[in-house]
Image (tube, rainbow, N blue to C red):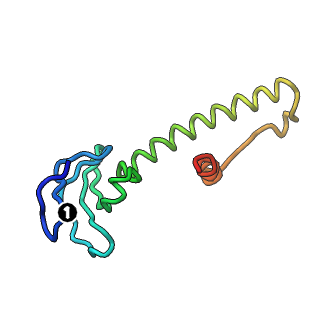
Amino acid sequence: MPGRKVHHGAVDYKGQRFGRLEARACDPKNPREGTYWWFVCECGNYVSIRMTNVFTGRTRSCGCLRKEYLGKYRKDLQEFLDMRNALEMALGLVDKSNAEFRMTLDEIDRLGRRGSG
């Protein structure tokens, strides 16, 4: 649902919503890199995003959506690891003196990327 033309044949998307983003103003970056627009996210952040990424759905927020997803993923993963470790200890499958399992946030992120590809 394109709006009126602004400059150089670009379409005015002001006020239109794309995921959590609302278009505010055209960003006059290098036209060879594509058309960029300034957006305000539902969380209040302002970001300049290439319209191709918005149209394809690659970008749906300022980054807050990813942070929320990763936070939930980490919580779910930690609950799973806690249950698995408790079960292994109850069944005597691990030495209780060495039963603690730790992962860094980078390791968790790598697991998330591996599962999403």
Element under disc 1: strand
* Residue 92 on image: x %, y %: 88, 27
- Is residue 20 placed above or below 4 in the rendered structure? above
Q: In which quarter of the view is residue 77 placed?
A: top right
In the image, 88 versus 116, the foreground residue is 116
> What count of labels does the image hold?
1
* Residue 85 on image: x %, y %: 76, 32
* Residue 28 on image: x %, y %: 21, 70
- Is residue 42 placed above or below 30 in the rendered structure? above
In the image, 92 versus 56, the foreground residue is 56
Q: In which quarter of the view is residue 98 placed?
A: top right
Q: Using residue 76 as the reference point, say whether residue 4 is left or right of it.
A: left
Say which residue label 1 marks. Answer: 26
Crowding near the residue tagged with mark 1, few <14, some 14–19, many ≥20 C-alpha atoms within 10 Å: many
Q: Amino acid at mark 1?
A: Cys
Which residue is drawn at the image coordinates 57% and 36% (left, top)? Answer: 75
